[in-house]
Image (cartoon, grey):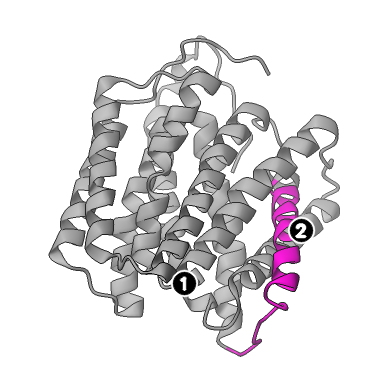
Amino acid sequence: MDTGLRESAAPDAGTTPARPARRGKDATARAALVVVWSSGFISGTLGLRYAAPFTFACLRFALAGGALLTVALLRRLPLPRGRLLLHLLVTGTLVQGLQFSSIYAGMERGVPSGVAALVIALYPLLASLISVPVLGERITRGQLLGLALGLGGVVLAVLDRLQLDGSSLAGIAFLFLGLLGISVGTVWQKLHCRDMEPVTGNAVQLLAAAAATLLPALLAEGFDVTFAAGFWPVLLWAAFINSIVGVGLLYHLLQRHGTSQVSSLFYLVPMATAALAAALLHQRLGPLTLAGLTLATAGTLLANRIGTPRRTSTPAR
């Protein structure tokens, strides 16, 4: 994740060849975000074999945040202070803590990883709706159509896979809580934390998430974890790849594009998650789920083809 490089208003001729390379890097970042974010549902499913949901989340955030804080101290990077520090605490609690602990709690209650990914895939719609009044972004008709197609695909696939018993309903409730966390948190990030230093900023956010999940891990779960050999690779992947790389890619793209365009990439996550779950967890998908995933993917491609949404105004910072 970078802090956003400003281009001059009139670039010289020497900058022209760099534009295709920049577009290529941007496409790579988008693809990497989808793959890394999808793998988080798989690491969560595997991690829950060894630890309770809030306990696993707390360990994930503490390990990742501690590693980044160590790097920051060794490099003598300035730590955030004042309002920026408060905003980072808020975004870390929402984007990392609330989202992922809720996903884990939902999957523990029987919601399959693919269905969990589909519920979180509603994030583009909710984040885009929040961004219109808060960030002054404008969504075109084409993007609205793409978002609507994606939403329809999500609903179709969820209806095919979900068993509406008490446990599943509780799991879905947790997932919608996580959906609210990432939707509000990323808009808050774009509005208040654009200029954060990436290492120290992400460290603060992760440690805030660890602190937020520690209390329920202790009180509700007794910090239930089995430190078996198979647990460590899963925890390390969740901490370093999902927490650091994944969220870093998300914030990097948010700094360069509109919220609705970036968040619509999450419609691709269920398809990627389903492929990973089939290969690694041997989860099979029904024809209705596959149709929903295809529809959601088509909506993403349409929404991203329109381009970055324009602003109707510049919000005060």
Amino acid type at image mark 1 = Arg
First along the sequence among labels 1 and 2:
1
Q: Where is residue 40 drawn, in percent x and y?
A: 48, 63
Amino acid type at image mark 2 = Ala
Q: Where is residue 285 drawn, in percent x and y?
A: 22, 69
Q: Residue at x 19, y 47 (%)?
A: 295
Please state if 203 lies on the left or on the right of 228 as rendered: right
Mark 1: give few (<14), some (14-19) or many (20+) Cα within 10 Å.
some
Q: Which residue is mark 1?
A: 109
Q: Which residue is mark 2?
A: 211
Residue 33: in magenta span: no
Q: Nearer the viewer, residue 260 or 98?
A: 98
Q: Residue at x 29, y 66 (%)?
A: 275
Can residue 62 be seen from the camera position used here? yes
- Overall secondary structure of the magenta section: helix
Q: Is residue 314 above or below residue 213?
A: above
Q: Where is residue 292 drawn, in percent x and y?
A: 20, 53
Q: Is residue 86 above or below residue 59?
A: above
